Amino acid sequence: MRFFPPRQPNELVPGLAVGHDGPIRADAPAAAQWNAPWFDLAPRAGLLVLFPASVDHAVLENEDPDDSRFSISLDLVLTAPKGEGGASAEYLAPHPADWQQVG
């Protein structure tokens, strides 16, 4: 899975992460990690990744023909418990049973 952060990890000097001994050289192993415009997360058995929908992301091609990999996308909405009579918990949407059709 590839994540595209909304901004570079190094915001002081965009595109040039600075290490303890000064700027990281382009050929240094850390340069690929800290100067890349994306972050890759390798799949492994049992891994569940949850992240906000606002994060740009992509699922990379599965290069192992003998291995199945599944990517499931969904939206999750936290709501107040049913039967609160419209007095929902602070910062929670009303329970779907309390929703009203508009229009």
Image (cartoon, rainbow, N blue to C red):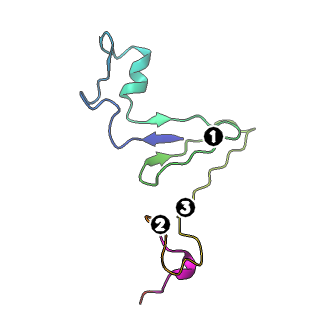
Sequence-wise, the earlier of marks 2 and 3 is 3
Give the Cα distance between marks 1 and 3: 26 Å
Q: Which residue ends up furthest to the left in the rendered image?
A: 13
- The residue to which callout 2 is attached is 92
Coordinates of residue 31 in the picture (x, y in percent): 38, 20
Q: Residue at x 67, y 36 (%)?
A: 44
Name the secondary structure under disc 2. Answer: loop
Query: Is 82 in the magenta?
Result: no
Q: Residue at x 42, y 23 (%)?
A: 32
Name the secondary structure under disc 1. Answer: loop
- The residue to which callout 3 is attached is 76
Quadrant containing the N terminus in the rendered view: top right
Q: Nearer the viewer, mark 2 or mark 1?
A: 2
Q: Which residues are magenta?
A: 93-101
Sequence-wise, the earlier of marks 2 and 1 is 1
Give the amino acid at mark 1. Answer: Asn
Name the secondary structure under disc 3. Answer: loop
Give the amino acid at mark 2. Answer: Leu
For the residues labelled 2 and 3, say whether their Cβ atoms are less than 8 Å apart: no
- The residue to which callout 1 is attached is 62
Q: Residue at x 62, y 37 (%)?
A: 43
Query: Is 98 in the magenta?
Result: yes
Coordinates of residue 27 in the picture (x, y in percent): 38, 14
Magenta span dominant secondary structure: loop
Coordinates of residue 100 in the picture (x, y in percent): 48, 85
